[in-house]
Image (cartoon, grey):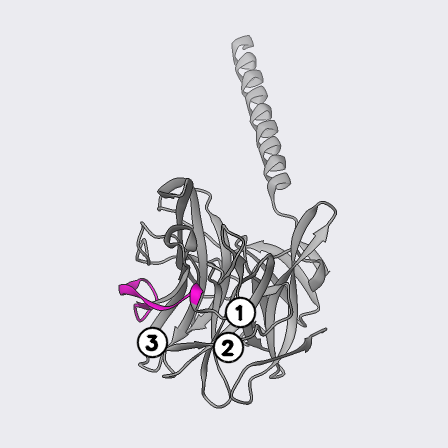
Amino acid sequence: MKTQQNYFKQKSLLVISLCICFLYFAAAHAQKKRLIRENVPLDSIRLSDPAILADKKTNMYYMTGTGGLLWKSKDLKSWSGPYEVAKTDPNSWMGPNPMIWAAEFHQYKNKYYYFATFTNRDKIIDTVAGNNIERRASHILVSDNAQGPYVPMKDEIYLPANKPTLDGTFWIDKDGKPYMIYCYEWLQNGNGTMEKIELKPDLSGSIGEGKLLFKASDSPWSREKDANGKDKTNKVTDGPYLFKTGSGRLGMIWTSWIYDVYTQGVAYSKSGTLDGPWIQEKDPITPPNFGHGMLFQTFEGKWLMSVHSHRKVGDKTVRIPKLFEVDLSGDKLVVGKPYLP
């Protein structure tokens, strides 16, 4: 009898110990769980490369960008988040914890797609001028719902493993085929380029090779100093986004720098297709310190541009989302006043 009592006593102690361990790990997990904030004003959110989807299915605005997170709002004024939505494969080239940059939502054929740049900092693909270049590429995830989760599709890569690419966006060209438009990074080629690659009909992979659209040096407005202090065009291509004007003209907003100021310009395709040639406008289209823009239409039909700006907070520089009104009714995109919902 005493042996049996000892057995049950030991068993009870084991169960209690397991319960304590479970509660401990549950509490630790709860502490790690991301805090969801409610009723957050847009200018209180810290976010680079903000991209907004107006989802008519849910009558909700969804915003993402660098970081792989999501914010949502019914009126563009009050936001809740951030929610984790990007689910990558830890066994892929991205590794278990990739950096996520410049994500965008695109709705296409009853699916939602997450175009983003993923960086595996543990993989070095090249060394140029003493700089190690990490494995970085534009890639696409998919979901049945705007809020995700977004998961990998069939193809492991969309773009060459030996090229650093970033800021992929989406366009259906006049040939009816889907394309990714992306930047080939200046860190490797010394003169950043804008390129396109055809996508499979379900966007699950790419077809063929990338094709050059234009180079950073084609810009008449971007500037930097060379080693001798002389002016030259900046080497950075950043943040492409395609649109059509009311007259049917194909345009692309994209971002570079004027010395140390982040700045956005625009180019128009002479042929009306992605193949161009692309004619760069002489002057930037947004005020200084605004860039990496995208365009979307509100549920009321108003066209807006979402960008970010750099703001000094204490000894840190943070990036703040901002909305501008835009007019697409004519032959050119015209950026108007800031939009305050």
Q: Quadrant of residue 199?
A: bottom left
Closer to the chain start, of discs 3 and 2, is: 3
Is residue 109 something one can see in this rendering? no
Q: Taking 226 as reference, is 31 above or below it?
A: above
Mark 3 to mark 2 CA distance (whole Å):
17 Å
Q: Amino acid at mark 1?
A: Trp
Crowd rating for badge 2 (residues with CA inside 10 Å; few <14, some 14–19, many 20+): some
Check disc 2 and report the residue beneath it: 281
Check disc 1 and report the residue beneath it: 221
Which one is nearer the viewer's eye here, 9 or 225?
225
Q: Amino acid at mark 3?
A: Asp
Instruction: Label 2: state its secondary structure.
Output: loop
Q: Position of residue 51 (x, y in %)?
A: 55, 66
Please identify, in this view, whether the residue under mark 3 or under mark 1 is nearer the observer: 1
Residue extending farthest left: 208
Q: Amino acid at mark 2?
A: Glu
Residue 287 is left or right of residue 214, and the answer is: right
